[in-house]
Amino acid sequence: MVYQNAKARDLFSNRCIITAIINNTTKFNDMKNKMSLTIKHTKNSIHMLMGLGLLIFLSACSSTPVNTGSQPNTVSRTSTAEMQEQLTEGKSLFLKKQYKEAAVLLLPLARQGDIDAQYSVGYMYHYGYGLPRNEKESTRWIATAAARGHLIAQEALARIDATHGPGGVIAE
């Protein structure tokens, strides 16, 4: 291409450089956004694996009484129908803001493995409803319910991890 003067040639050259910079900046930003999403998904996966690891660790620490036959098993397990009735009553008491009474019903169910009760107990520990406010206990119960498939607990655990980091407790 023939230019009429040096100024026109320089102007064309500057436009080419600016266009190249804009194209490269756009490509860089697209690449940066893709990397950011990949990192975010990786962090979420790590948090879910940590929650699962916590559940496995906690389940290894629990024990079940064994009846040797010489004495009757004194640990009474609640039937499924009774557990459901107790859970319904505990939730009803919670909604009526009778938190301590709700905790009396829900805590044994949580210990017996009811995931709805586990999430509820974690929530109650988190906010200090009927149980003393305790972030470690809150996170433990919510992580247990989440690892066992409770969807709301999984969402809550993700929010706790996002706010406080893995493990859910603010560093002191």
Image (tube, rainbow, N blue to C red):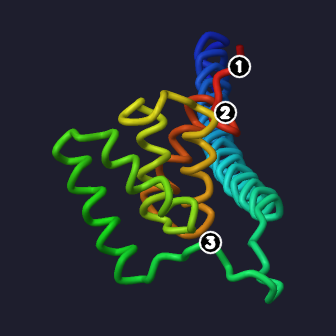
- Inspect the image, locate mark 3, and give the three-letter code of the amino acid beneath it: Val
Residue found at x 62% / y 14% = 5
Give the residue drawn at x 54%, y 69%: 149
Q: Residues within 10 Å of mark 2 (few under 14, many from 20)?
A: some
What mark, if any, has residue 75 been given in the picture?
A: 3
N-term mark: 3 or 1? 3
Q: Are marks 1 and 2 in contact (CB under 8 Å)?
A: yes
Q: Secondary structure at mark 1?
A: loop
Going from N to C along the chain, the mark reached first, 1 or 2, is 2
> Residue placed farthest to the front in the image?
70
Kindly report the distance in space between the C-alpha atoms of the residues bearing marks 3 and 2. 38 Å
Residue at position x 55%, y 40% in the image: 138
Which of labels 1 and 2 is toward the front?
1
Q: 113 or 74, which is in the foreground?
A: 74
Please determine whether, in this image, residue 92 is positioned above or below residue 27.
Answer: below
Place residue 162 in its image quadrant: top right
**Mark 2: which amino acid?**
Gly
Question: Residue 99: where, in percent of width, then height?
Answer: 30, 40
Q: In 3D space, how far apart are the residues under numbered discs 1 and 2 (Cα atoms)?
A: 9 Å
Residue at position x 64%, y 19% in the image: 14
Residue that carries the numbered disc 2 in the rendered image: 165
Query: Could you tell whether 101 is left or right of 15 in the image?
Result: left
Say if 144 sits above or below 130 in the image: below
Residue to which mark 1 is pinned: 171
**Tag shown at residue 2:** none
Q: Is residue 50 left or right of residue 153?
A: right
Q: Secondary structure at mark 2?
A: loop
Question: Quick check: marks 3 and 1 in contact, CB under 8 Å?
Answer: no
Instruction: Say which amino acid is labelled 1.
Output: Ala
